Image (spheres, rainbow, N blue to C red):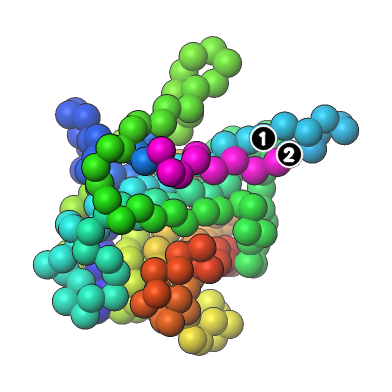
């Protein structure tokens, strides 16, 4: 069974807790992911958008098959600016399988000694959307919406990656102004043997849009 992500706006700080958007709480051993950008011959590094962090102990009641870790923190980053309405964004990875530079899945086995990494623009405003709390519930493997595990909801993606698990499925969301071109869905995919080994660096990211 897959695990659906349910979002709730939060007034309190979500440091060390499962949340979507906001800022990640990372250990010293993990650096905030950046991607090199070459603009008119000038090379600089652009931070990837932080999607979410999942406190793995929260998954214990829902991941009865033990497919995911039940301790530590799991993080997802991706080049999302264009799909959040920033039409002038330098990074727009396009459809199909993304270049590994355009996304990152990180994991730390402990939730101790984590530090919030805040990215700001030149005017001092915070990079990204406000954090929202995540709660979880069991759902069908082929359901739509935002979820962990199962198979991609779209037939076309399942057929292209028949041997992969959908580690994280990201749907569109009008409240966040999140849209994948006309209509689409983003999947972080991983082979079952890599998931079992905790080899999250072997995940891939695929965008399908109609």
Q: Which image quadrant is residue 144 in?
A: bottom left
Pinpoint residue 104: horizontal percent, then vertical percent. Answer: 52, 54
Q: Residue at x 64, y 52 (%)?
A: 101
Pinpoint residue 76: horizontal percent, then vertical percent. Answer: 43, 52
Pinpoint residue 134: horizontal percent, then vertical percent. Answer: 23, 49
Q: Nearer the viewer, residue 99 or 10?
A: 99
**Considering only vertical position in the picture, is 110 above or below 121?**
below
**Considering only vertical position in the picture, is 198 above or below 42?**
below
Q: Secondary structure at mark 2?
A: strand
Q: Tell me the quadrant of the picture where the N terminus can be found.
A: bottom left
Q: Nearer the viewer, residue 195 or 171?
A: 195
From the image, tell me which residue sits under label 1: 45
Total count of labels: 2
Q: CA distance from mark 1 to mark 2?
A: 6 Å
| Residue that lies at the very extreme toward the left in this rendered image | 61
Q: Which image quadrant is residue 46 in?
A: top right
Tell me which segment is drawn in magenta: 28-36
**Disc 1 crowd, CA 10 A, few/some/many (<14, 14-19, 20+):** few
From the image, tell me which residue sits under label 2: 37
Q: Residue at x 35, y 53 (%)?
A: 108
Q: Residue at x 38, y 34 (%)?
A: 23
Label annotation for residue 145? none
């Amino acid at each position: 069974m897959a695990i659906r992500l349910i979002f709730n706006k939060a007034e309190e700080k979500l440091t060390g807790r499962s949340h979507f958007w906001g800022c990640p709480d990372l250990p010293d051993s993990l650096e905030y992911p950046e991607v090199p950008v070459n603009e008119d011959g000038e090379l600089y590094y652009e931070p990837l958008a932080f999607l979410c962090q999942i406190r793995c102990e929260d998954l214990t009641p829902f991941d009865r098959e033990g497919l995911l870790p039940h301790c530590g923190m799991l993080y997802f980053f991706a080049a999302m600016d264009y799909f959040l309405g920033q039409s002038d964004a330098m990074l727009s990875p396009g459809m199909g399988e993304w270049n590994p530079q355009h996304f990152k899945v990180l994991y730390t086995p402990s939730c101790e000694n984590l530090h919030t990494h805040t990215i700001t623009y030149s005017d001092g405003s915070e990079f990204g959307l406000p954090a929202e709390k995540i709660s979880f519930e069991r759902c069908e493997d082929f359901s739509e919406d935002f979820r962990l595990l199962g198979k991609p909801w779209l037939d076309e993606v399942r057929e292209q990656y028949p041997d992969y698990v959908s580690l994280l499925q990201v749907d569109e969301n009008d409240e966040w102004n999140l849209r994948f071109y006309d209509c689409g869905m983003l999947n972080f995919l991983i082979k079952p043997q890599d998931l079992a080994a905790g080899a999250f660096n072997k995940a891939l990211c695929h965008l399908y849009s109609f």
